[in-house]
Amino acid sequence: MQLKLCRSTIAVVVVILCSLQGVNAQKAIVVRFDALQKIIDTKSDQIQVINFWATWCAPCVKELPLLEKINAQKNLNAKITLVNLDYADKLDKVNEFVVRKNIQSDVLLLDDLDYNSWIDKVDKSWSGAIPATLIINPRTGKRKFVEKELKEGELENLIASLN
Amino acid sequence: MMKHFGLIGLVVVLISGKPLKYEIGDAVADFRLKNVDGKMVALSDYASAKGAIVIFDCNTCPYSRAYNDRIIALNKKYLEKGFPVITINPNDPQMSPGDSYEEMVSQAKRKKYDFPYLVDESQAVTRSFGATNTPHVFVLQKQGNDFKVAYIGTIDNNSRDATAATKKYVEDAVDALLTGKAVPTQNTKAIGCSIKWKNS
């Protein structure tokens, strides 16, 4: 009897732990470019930091902690959107990566392979190479676009420059 | 001769403050780079060609791998028509070990390249073209003794699936040049791996 109770308690605990994990773990949302356009055009008070990356892109993966750090600093009032450019059939791989790295920023998998149709809409100066990061202050209307790997502290300076 | 081009380029960069890169209609300076067979290949070697399909490409980039068979097919289709494919690896092997000369040689052997796969060790040719990612295509048209830029961009509009591509930019450009028509789309952009520059 006691053993049975113990077992069911363990089972309940396991279920609770699993569901807690489910709440915390982020998942990539598959979107088309129009969803990203809405974020670029948002009138929110938050600074929008839109980073383009892929799991296979080493410099992209390297700079992700810098973006996560900004995401965690709530006083900066910056919204991080990580736009993943892996192919949509790699969604499971992307989600596995997001969980393994415990990424807390929003992750969108941009499934829009007609790249030429939308690259200029992000920024006219963008060649299409990644990593690339667009920072917009909707309040001032100022924006910065960076087509290279971010260095420690660079993002903070870029955000401050848009005030 | 090349030294002088470099010097002129440097002066222009100093004056304009902007890096020099080729635009549509520009004549391309001759280049001479080492091929995977150890021999040197120059653009001027293609004296009887009608043009060339110059592609900055590498071993490691997933987009390069996705487009590899399409690049091989481009040479099969257009070499005899006078537009040979010339691929150039721009990546610094220190930054990207999988793109070393030895790895280029084995890639060319494995995929039976029947076109040059050149190494741009100094990255000077890559800079002069203004290539930014791989694969990055420059379709050149021979006019007199000059090779002039007629198209800059991506191969088609679906990197994942060749059969799903609805716009074949490079083929459309070369077909237009072969029939004396205007190139329908002269510039396109695509997501690609950034070129791995030396100590950057």
Image (cartoon, coloured by chain):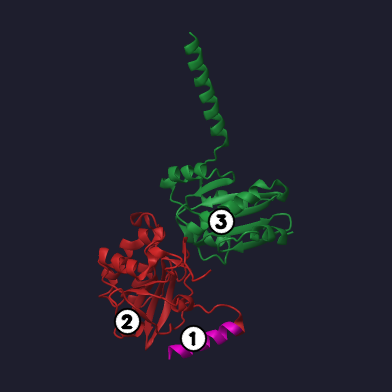
Residue A90, x across and y down, in percent: 42, 47
**Chain in green in the render:** A
Give SS at disc 3: helix
Q: Residue A158 occupies which quadrant of the picture? A: bottom right
Please name the residue shown 47% across and 88% down the image: B5
What label does residue A63 carry, if any? Answer: 3
Left or right for B70, reference A109: left
Residue A145, x across and y down, in percent: 61, 62
Please name the residue shown 25% across and 75% down the image: B80
Give SS at disc 1: helix
Residue A155, x across and y down, in percent: 65, 58
Q: Amino acid at mark 2?
A: Met
Disc 3 to disc 1, how far (Cα)?
34 Å
Residue A15 versus residue B64: which sits nearer the camera?
A15
**Chain in red in the render:** B
Please name the residue shown 43% across and 73% down the image: B151
Mark 1 residue crowding within 10 angstroms, few (<14) / some (14–19) / many (20+): some
Disc 3 to disc 2, how far (Cα)?
39 Å
Q: Amino acid at mark 3?
A: Glu
In the rendered structure, does residue B22 fall within the stretch colored magenta? no
First to last magenta residue range: B1-14
- Counting residues from the start of the chain, the first of labels 2 and 1 encountered is 1
Disc 2 to disc 1, how far (Cα)?
19 Å
- Write down the chain letter for disc 2: B
Q: Amino acid at mark 1?
A: Gly
Count of numbered tags: 3
Q: Is residue A21 visible?
A: yes
The residue that label 2 is drawn on is B40
